[in-house]
Amino acid sequence: MRYRRLGHSGCAVSELCLGTMTFGNETDEAGAHEQLDVFLEAGGTFVDTADVYSAGVSEEIIGAWLRSRPREVTDRVVLATKGRFAATDQGPNGNGLSTRHLTRALEDSLRRLGVDAVDLYQVHAFDEHTPMEETLRTLDGFVQAGKIHYYGLSNFTGWQLTKAVLTARALGLRQPVTLQPQYSLVVREIEWEIVPAALDAGMGLLPWSPLGGGWLSGKYRRDERPTGDTRLGDDPGRGMEAYDRRGNDRTWRIVDAVERVAESRGCSMAEVALSWVNNRPAVTATILGARTTDQLRTNLAAVDLQLTDQERAALDEASDPGATDYPYGELGVDQRARALAGG
């Protein structure tokens, strides 16, 4: 396991981050604690959760694990959580990025986690109703009060990210250090605006759903509707990764390309897909979301896989999202490549 700086901060985190959205829902407490133990034994230090994961139960499970393990183990953990949405019914002010809601949300998260402060506090999504200045002053105040050490953004677009950074600079406030976006071989559109904006601001990316909701692990097959104990087997119409929505020609082309690389290297498809995203420009740590410890162990093996230039080029070509025209299409590809390289 290698370690990287958390965006432009001085804090070091493991290159893989344990995502805990399954805790309390698809993964019970015993299984969650086992995952946390296995992750730290593999050299992992970075753990990500949110107040809305299983309506706060994920945070409670992590808090119980922190209390039950020796201090020399838990001191290694860099802990991240998020606030923005309604974890419980709090009425009309139980949502958004207002001072009122974020203050209550953070206090509730700290209580469930059983800690005095979290290392990274992330706003879970943009809020068009709350002035950016109010949100940023609130987050800066959390840092000054010692309740958080850094803050980040999640699911912001390029212009929203840039607005947050420039507003913080103008007000003389601390700036966000990370952005948590959806990013994988299946979802690459963030490279057009969001990745260059993050590079410009010195922010680190924390990609979620790096396996495309399971598509890049090889568990789904063309013309075979999902069945059995998988996310889409339980509900083929589930979320963004729904079978009929995502099962298009481009996705199958990507799956085939990942499978070819995996077969040639004698590794899992998940390792290939994770290695690709984990070594993209601006990425600080890739978030692993596993239902079982066996899945987690498979995903952790990605740290040992370094793709060749030829393998990356083949994956890039298969997954090109195919923008139609300048500045994103073929005419803008050189310009985009320079931006991604920080040039």
Image: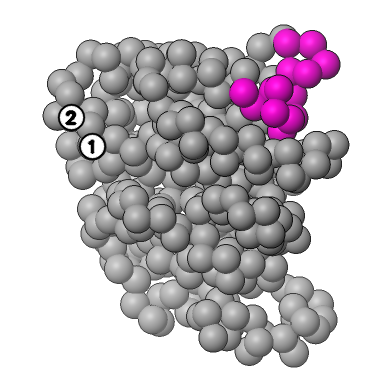
- Mark 1 lies on a secondary structure that is loop
Q: Looking at the picture, tell me which residue is in the foreground, 217 or 324.
A: 324
Does 95 lie within the magenta span? Answer: yes
Q: Is residue 66 above or below residue 96?
A: above
Residue 39, compared with residue 301, is above or below; it is above
The CA span between labels 1 and 2 is 6 Å
Which residue is disc 2 drawn over? 73
Tell me whether circle 1 and circle 2 mark residues in contact (CB < 8 Å).
yes
User: How many numbered circles are shown?
Assistant: 2
Residue 99: image quadrant is: top right
Amino acid type assigned to the residue bearing label 1 in the image: Arg
239 or 126: nearer the eye? 126
Q: Where is residue 269 shown, x and y percent of the image?
A: 40, 55
According to the picture, the residue beneath numbered tag 1 turns out to be 76
Taking 152 as reference, is 96 left or right?
right
Q: Residues within 10 Å of mark 1 (few under 14, many from 20)?
A: some
Q: Is residue 246 visible?
A: yes
Name the mark on residue 119. Answer: none
Colour pattern of the rendering: one colour
Label 2 secondary element: helix
Residue positioned 63% across, 89% down in the render: 334
Answer with left or right where residue 85 lies relative to residue 18: right
Where on the picture, by quarter, is residue 336?
Answer: bottom right
* Residue 165 in the image, given as x and y percentages of width and height: 64, 58
Q: Residue at x 48, y 30 (%)?
A: 145
Q: Visible in this render: residue 242? A: no
Task: Report the magenta residues as a range.
Answer: 90-103
The residue that appears at 52% across and 43% down in the rendered structure is 151
Residue 289: give x, y in percent of width and height.
45, 37
Tell me, yes or no, whether the highlighted magenta stretch contains residue 160: no
